[in-house]
Amino acid sequence: MKTITLYIAIIFSTLSVAQGNYEQGMNKAFELWMNDQRDQAANLFERIANAEQDNWVPHYYVTQINILKSWNVKDEAVLKAQLDKAQEHLNSANALSPDNPELMILQAQIYTNWIAFDGMTYGMKYSTKITEIYKKAQSLDPGNPRVVLSKAEWDMGSARYFGQDPTPHCEKVKQAIALFDTYEVDGEFHPDWGREHAKNVMASCNQ
């Protein structure tokens, strides 16, 4: 009986240390990111992802950082390298967490990045896919403020592109802001961004 008790104690001790290392690593990666050390943060998230092979969350942040780095990049080779890295980790995250609306947002953003780089080449290729992704994400998690906000921004951008008034979609931005007050994330370090960005988008709606 003492042997079994000792064995259980060792297991829980090992799990506790592993969880502690994960939390420390994630907090350090976010600290690097907040200090504008995005590449170092992405590298640390990637190391954590390699260690936490059943956890989609570190892959999420490697993907997100590479997406954010890619806005306004003019060098196609640089853009491709960064978005390929984003897609690689997004694929890994999707394998661990299929039909995850948070991951669907990132996929739509990767495609949007390509359209922003060259609308003539990538608009026809990805526009319909982006619309379908947001539609599916909304059907899976209609109360997710990031889904509502991201879809609203895509709809606003599409309206501007076709010379239409984007303001009807501002109501969805307002809805997203309200949802941030009630939506609960599933776990520690899960995506929780968007509130301040939604307020900024809403401010532009009111101008």
Image (spheres, rainbow, N blue to C red):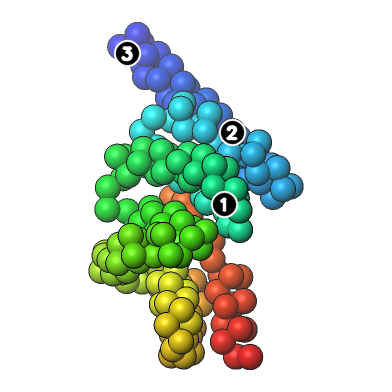
| Residue with the mark numbered 1 | 70
- Is there CB contact under 8 Å for labels 3 and 2? no
Answer few, some or many: residues within 10 Å of disc 2's Cα (few below 14, many 20 plus, some between 14 and 19).
few
CA distance for labels 3 and 2: 40 Å
Rendered view: 110 above or below 49? below
SS state under label 3: helix
Q: Position of residue 65 (x, y in %)?
A: 56, 48
Q: Is residue 44 above or below residue 195?
A: above
Tag 3: amino acid: Ile
Q: Residues within 10 Å of mark 3 (few under 14, many from 20)?
A: few
Q: Residue at x 37, y 19 (%)?
A: 8
Q: Position of residue 160 (x, y in %)?
A: 48, 82
Q: Which residue is mark 3?
A: 4
Figure quadrant of residue 44: top right
Q: Locate the N terminus by quadrant.
A: top left
- Front residue of this view, candidates 80 and 28: 80
How far apart are the alpha carbons under marks 2 and 1? 16 Å
Identify the disc placed on residue 203. Answer: none
Q: Is residue 63 visible?
A: no
**Closer to the camera in the image, 166 or 145:** 166
Q: Residue at x 42, y 77 (%)?
A: 158
Q: Is residue 91 above or below residue 101?
A: above
Which of discs 2 and 1 lies nearer the camera? The answer is 1
Question: Badges 2 and 1: C-beta atoms under 8 Å apart?
Answer: no
Amino acid type at image mark 1: Ser
Mark 3 and mark 2 lie on one chain; the one further toward the N terminus is 3
Residue ID for mark 2: 43
- Nearer the camera: disc 3 or disc 2: 2
- The foreground one among 124 and 64 is 124
Instruction: Pinpoint residue 64: horizontal percent, then vertical percent.
Output: 51, 50
Q: Is residue 84 left or right of residue 137?
A: right
